[in-house]
Image (cartoon, rainbow, N blue to C red):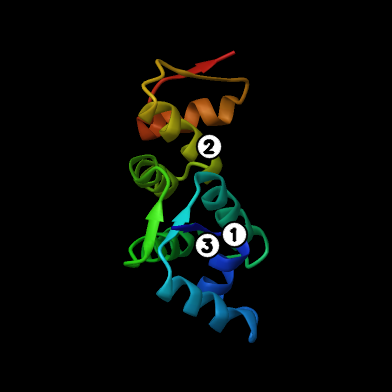
Amino acid sequence: MLAVDTNVIVRCLTRDDAKQAPVARDFIDHNDVLVLSTVLVECEWVLRSVHRLPAAMIAALLRQFAGLPTVSIENPAAFALALDWFGMGMDFADAMHLATASEADCEAFATFDRKLSSAARKARAGTVKAL
């Protein structure tokens, strides 16, 4: 299994580079790949900030990519939770942090971020301890 970088996934999803996109897709199609949680967070950021895609489209693209037969996700349960919470309006990186903490059986996620605390309450996304 080979771990893949954000740029490989983004090329595959957006086809934004005529030379690299087919190489990325061929690589994904012919290799078992692992997508690390940090790469997922970066992918969402690139798709939102650089490609200006809406959250619903980003979630759909990431789900579709994760469902490819050669793709494994580092922490699939946390990723699934994070996508659900992202769909409820939570920032994806925050959702991944909370979901990973939840999967690690942490009793709470401590933060100074009041917006995160509020979003977590709305999404019933685990326990956030606002400092």
Q: Residues within 10 Å of mark 2 (few under 14, many from 20)?
A: some
Task: Tell me the residue at 66%/59% (across/down).
Answer: 49
The residues bearing labels 3 and 1 have C-alpha atoms spaced at a distance of 18 Å
Q: CA distance from mark 3 to mark 2?
A: 17 Å
Looking at marks 3 and 2 on the same chain, the residue that comes earlier in the sequence is marked by: 3
**Which kind of residue does numbered mark 1 sit on?**
Thr
Ranked by sequence position, the earlier of labels 1 and 2 is 1
Which residue is the site of mark 1?
6
Label drawn at residue 54? 3
Q: Nearer the viewer, mark 3 or mark 2?
A: 2
The answer to which of marks 3 and 1 sits earlier in the sequence is 1
Closest to the observer: 40 or 86?
40
Question: What distance separates the C-alpha of mark 1 from that of mark 2?
Answer: 18 Å
Whole-percent x and y of residue 86? Answer: 44, 46
Q: Secondary structure at mark 1?
A: helix
**Residue 15 showing in the rendered view:** no
User: In this rendering, is residue 60 above or below 88?
Assistant: below
User: In the drawing, what numbered circle is on residue 94?
Assistant: 2
Q: Amino acid at mark 3?
A: Pro
Q: Is residue 17 left or right of residue 25?
A: right
Which residue lies at the image location 40% right of the left edge and 48% below the top edge? 83
Crowding at dot 1, Cα within 10 Å, few <14 / some 14-19 / many 20+, comes out as some
**Does residue 35 show up?**
yes
Q: Amino acid at mark 2?
A: Asp
